[in-house]
Amino acid sequence: MPPDPTPSRSTPPRAVLLDIEGTTIPVSFVHDVLFPYARAALPALLREHADDPQVHAAIAEVARLAPGVDPLAQLEAWMDRDEKIAPLKTLQGIAWAQGYRTGRLSARMYPDVLPALRAWSAAGIRLAVYSSGSVAAQKLIYGHTDEGDVTALFDGFYDLAMGGKREAASYAHIMARAGWVAADVLFLSDVVAELDAAAQAGLRTCQIARPEDGTVAGTTHRVAATFAEVSRMSGLPVAA
């Protein structure tokens, strides 16, 4: 894998594409709060809302992917393996929506994230999200943070409909959908394989290695522990 070409680029990025888990939100929030909440809620969701069109379609997709297997058992097996499967993500998103609406869930973001995003947005830097979680789930997270609804900061939300996060073509699809030039876009993620794919598609990259999450820094991309470091490395505005 060739090294990240970003150091040779002298101009700041015009847009930033952001991962969520381990990048803007602690892994512990996802694994210790969101996932257990969805697991507990899924039995009632499947039982009581099977006629809801979105739930019905997701259950049908589970049956297609795992014929003859009880849908709940299959969903739980996917959760056990942290699989990035579309119907699972859809149903988790529906469960989380209920939790956010009732006030039982509120997203905790790293403290350096929102100040940086606000500074970047105010300077005209375009922002978008790319996560394995569904677009609906992404909007729930950013619509119900501990600091309120911050979805207005983002121009776009992208999920696995664009393709897998470890596939270069997915990033090309996002660039086409957003109307962005890959060389002008900085992708932030904690996962080296995702950064590799983004770099193959021509994006600039930076790995977010959060001490809280114990992220292991790679060697082929620039590395930052906070968004303030990203700002300094990339020539982006630094939050006051």
Image (cartoon, helix red, strand yellow):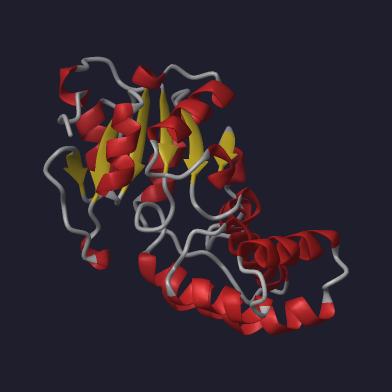
x, y percent for residue 217: 16, 52
Seen in the picture, residue 61 relative to 120 is either above or below; the reply is below
Q: Quadrant of residue 31?
A: bottom left
Residue farthest along the front direction in this orientation: 68
Point 75% across, 63% down: residue: 60
Q: Nearer the viewer, residue 89 or 101?
A: 89
Q: Nearer the viewer, residue 221 or 54?
A: 54
Seen in the picture, residue 202 relative to 60 is either above or below; the reply is above
Residue farthest along the left direction in this orientation: 219
Point 59% across, 74% down: residue: 75
Seen in the picture, residue 30 relative to 77 is either above or below; the reply is above
Q: Is residue 45 left or right of residue 187?
A: right
Quarter of the image with the C terminus in it: top left
Quarter of the image with the N terminus in it: top left
Q: Is residue 239 visible?
A: no
Q: Nearer the viewer, residue 157 or 122?
A: 157
Point 51% across, 71% down: residue: 78
Point 20% across, 62% down: residue: 211
Seen in the picture, residue 149 relative to 152 is either above or below; the reply is below
Q: Nearer the viewer, residue 86 or 27?
A: 86
Q: How many marks can you see?
A: 0
x, y percent for residue 120: 41, 32
x, y percent for residue 117: 43, 40
Q: Quadrant of residue 155?
A: top right
